[in-house]
Image (spheres, rainbow, N blue to C red):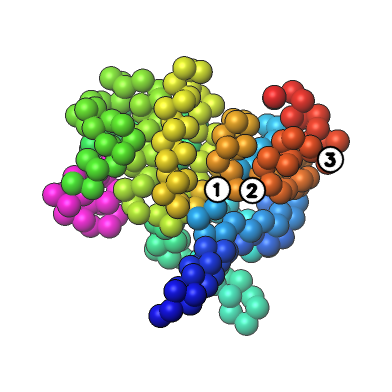
Amino acid sequence: MTDTASINKHEATRVKPLVEIQGVHKLFGDHHVLKGIDMTVRQGEVSVIIGPSGSGKSTLLRCINLLETISAGRIYVHDDLIGFRDVNGKLHDLNTKQIAAQRREIGMVFQRFNLFPHKTALQNVIEAPTQVKRQSKAAAKLKALELLEMVGLSDRANFYPAQLSGGQQQRVAIARALAMEPELMLFDEPTSALDPELVGDVLEVMKNLAKSGMTMIVVTHEIGFAREVGDTLTFMDAGVVVESGNPRDIIANPQHHRTQEFLSRVL
């Protein structure tokens, strides 16, 4: 392959959409939480979502990760229709096994760390690879130790969650999600439950993950992270996308009055 062909192939891969969200609605009874969300996240991109509480940001992530079922629309990850199969234009629910298979490709880090309190950091990280992927304990342990070193916790492998700070627990949670080798990582306000002095270490891990080429969708109030690391920034309010584009442009010069109001309060 010529150098030019190699570059063109690399560019095509780099810009290929990994996530496509098309007209997604979500209702909880009469409460219309998502109102026709459209979004594309390309391979290797960091897509940051901001907005006030109740705007639907977390619900959108939970729909991508099949923790919630959408009411209308479609979500694709790597061209796979999430949660459904299409038979002649009609959608049919996937079964539990099929949903579990799709979910394995998507890592998620929550506000709360959700670690097993009776297991060490190392045991938390190897749990899913050994139980879900049926990896050998030896192989899972080797990978887990690499991941714990990556998140700066190689010296805390045998500590229990109660012996770790909130920031350390969140970094273990990130390592745990990465242990399944996902194609996509979702972060739902990963620093919101942390004391301010612990936020930096978690954000540094996320920055390094972005540099490695991981595709990420990050719901956060950390505007500095959005400005520095984000490839796209989406502002949501009341279940709709109000404004989306280059993070630096939107933060410096938001076009919509609602975006202006929100940023004036958080900056």
Which SS class for mark 3? loop
**Of the pair 181 and 70, the residue shown nearer to us:** 181
Q: Residue at x 60, y 31 (%)?
A: 224
Residue 256's tag is: 3
Residue that carries the numbered disc 2 in the rendered image: 232
Q: Earlier in the sequence, mark 2 or mark 1?
A: 1
Marks 3 and 1 in Cβ contact (< 8 Å): no
Using a 10 Å C-alpha cutoff, classify the residue at mark 3 as few (fewer than 14 neighbours), some (14 to 19) or many (20 or more): few
Using a 10 Å C-alpha cutoff, classify the residue at mark 2 as few (fewer than 14 neighbours), some (14 to 19) or many (20 or more): many
Write the start and end of the magenta stretch as one range.
124-141
User: How many discs appear?
Assistant: 3
Q: In this view, which residue lies farthest toward the right?
A: 257
Q: In this view, which residue lies farthest toward the front?
A: 3
Q: Residue at x 84, y 40 (%)?
A: 256
Marks 2 and 3 in Cβ contact (< 8 Å): no
Residue 46's tag is: 1
Q: List x then y, in percent, for residue 7.
A: 49, 70
Q: Amino acid at mark 2?
A: Thr
